[in-house]
Image (tube, rainbow, N blue to C red):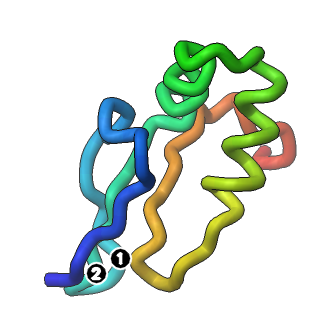
Amino acid sequence: MSDRLTADGFDAAIVGVGRQGPSNELTVYSYDKCIELLKNDGMTEEDAIDHFEFNVVGGWVGPSTPVFLMPEDYCESCD
């Protein structure tokens, strides 16, 4: 079992654990809940999204980087 990494300050947005291959487990967060947490800290929605995308989602730290689950309708090019 791998050591799962977490995103500081977003524990309330954890929705589960994902598996990548036979032994790599990843912490899975709700993207929307993460944005709500930042808004609850006083950010506007636009600022929360910008901050989250650049500083958290964009922070690749290797194969144990957490996963941020987005609603299906988030991706306009996924059809």
- Position of 7 with respect to 50 (left or right) is left
Kind of residue at badge 1:
Gln
Residue bearing the label numbered 1: 20
Q: Position of residue 70 (x, y in %)?
A: 58, 39
| Mark 2, residue position | 24
- Measure the alpha-carbon separation of dots 1 and 2: 5 Å
Q: Residue lying farthest left?
A: 1
Q: Secondary structure at mark 1?
A: strand
User: Residue 65 vs residue 41: left or right?
Assistant: left
Quadrant for residue 46, please give it. Answer: top right
Position of residue 7 relative to residue 47, above or below, is below
For the residues labelled 1 and 2, say whether their Cβ atoms are less than 8 Å apart.
Answer: yes
* CA neighbours of label 2 inside 10 A, class few (<14), some (14 to 19), many (20+): some
Identify which amino acid the numbered label 2 is placed on: Asn
Residue at x 84%, y 38% (from the top left corner): 76
Classify 78 as above or below 67.
Answer: above
Residue 25 at x, y = what percent?
A: 26, 72
Q: Residue at x 51, y 44 (%)?
A: 69
Q: Which quadrant does the C terminus fall into? A: top right
Kindly identify the residue that appears in the image at 62 percent across and 34 percent down: 72
Q: Where does the image place residue 78, in percent across and percent down from the top left?
A: 76, 48
